[in-house]
């Protein structure tokens, strides 16, 4: 088994620098992929951080300002502008969605939704969760098996990695809001079909309108394509500051993709540090 020092050195090599500091012992059995993007990994299998309900946390969340801000060291410069998309007029989202004035109300609607075939196979719909006044909002593709069972987004292995990524940029999970393009699990975790995504998208648009984040982070190509309304590869959409209305939108890899391909860890670390810089009021 690798010693902590060996793991530490591997982190440095993978990140191409010395921005990662291992300050706590890694638990046995932790996936190596998690080490590349987290400064202080949480033990895998430990309890998920308690995420406040939409009604519980009215204050606008602020990223934690750590004294050192390790993520800032050698962070890439903020890239140039990309696409600009306008959110749909609220009236175009459909009367019911348009009338919702809280995330809880919207979640109730999602739990009973039968607007597409994905409702037939779901155990639980997964509306999304997090700080209702989050400054950072993460958008993924759709629920997986664990999410379908629990009704919570990003709670499987990819979710644990996302938690570590967020912690590494001083935006712990309880400060952000996390949602998906589709709220019900596609069979065999396949990509949502266009009609499914189109049917579900009004919920996401309304969530963004209610949360009013400072920065949007699209996790994976599906989230990027549907938020930006284009059919382009992830490579074409990364490394630009897109705009969803007035909100800067950064595109990066889905955490599940990082579990499959470690080569994407370094670019992801760059992307999330760009997003983190945009949370700084002077950068957005
Ligand atoms: S995926 Fe979205 S549109 Fe389809 S049933 Fe679920 S909540 Fe409704």
Image: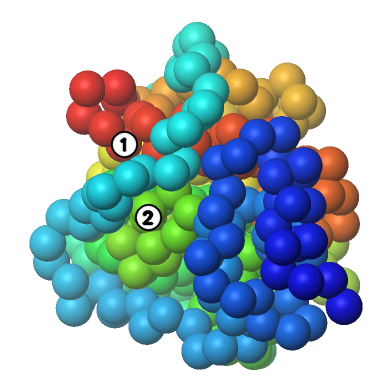
Q: For the point 49% across and 83% down, which residue is it?
A: 48
- Figure check: 92 above or below 102: above
Please give left or right for residue 75 compared with residue 188 in the image: left
Please give left or right for residue 212 compared with residue 207 in the image: left
On the image, the x and y values in percent for residue 50 come to 37, 83
* Residue 177 visible in the picture: no
First in sequence: mark 1 vs mark 2:
2
Q: For the point 37% across and 55% down, which residue is it?
A: 171
Residue highlighted by disc 2: 171
On the image, the x and y values in percent for residue 240 come to 56, 19
Does dot 1 land on a helix, a strand or a loop?
loop
Residue 184 sits in which quadrant? Answer: bottom right
**Mark linked to residue 279:** 1
Q: Quadrant of the N terminus?
A: bottom right
Is there CB contact under 8 Å for labels 1 and 2? yes
Residue 268 sits in which quadrant? Answer: top right
């Amino acid at each position: 088994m690798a010693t902590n020092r060996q793991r530490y050195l591997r982190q440095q090599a993978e990140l191409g620098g010395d921005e990662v500091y291992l300050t706590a012992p890694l638990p046995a059995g932790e996936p190596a992929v998690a080490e590349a993007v987290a400064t202080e990994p949480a033990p895998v299998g430990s309890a998920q951080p308690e995420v406040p309900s939409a009604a519980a946390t009215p204050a606008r969340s602020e990223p934690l300002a750590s004294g050192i801000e390790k993520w800032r060291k050698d962070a890439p410069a903020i890239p140039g502008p990309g696409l600009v998309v306008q959110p749909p007029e609220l009236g175009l989202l459909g009367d019911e969605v348009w009338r919702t004035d809280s995330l809880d109300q919207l979640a109730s609607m999602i739990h009973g939704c039968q607007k597409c075939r994905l409702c037939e196979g779901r155990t639980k719909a997964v509306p999304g969760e997090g700080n209702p006044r989050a400054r950072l909002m993460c958008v993924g593709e759709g629920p997986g098996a664990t999410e379908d069972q629990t009704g919570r987004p990003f709670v499987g292995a990819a979710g644990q990695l996302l938690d570590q990524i967020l912690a590494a940029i001083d935006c712990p999970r309880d400060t952000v809001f996390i949602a998906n393009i589709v709220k019900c699990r596609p069979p065999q975790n396949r990509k949502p079909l266009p009609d499914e995504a189109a049917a579900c998208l009004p919920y996401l648009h309304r969530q963004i309108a209610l949360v009013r984040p400072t920065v949007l982070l699209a996790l994976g190509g599906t989230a990027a394509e549907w938020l930006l309304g284009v059919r382009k590869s992830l490579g074409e959409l990364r490394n630009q500051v897109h705009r969803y209305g007035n909100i800067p939108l950064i595109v990066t890899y889905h955490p599940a993709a990082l579990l499959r391909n470690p080569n994407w860890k370094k670019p992801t670390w760059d992307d999330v540090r760009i997003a983190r810089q945009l949370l700084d009021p002077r950068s957005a």
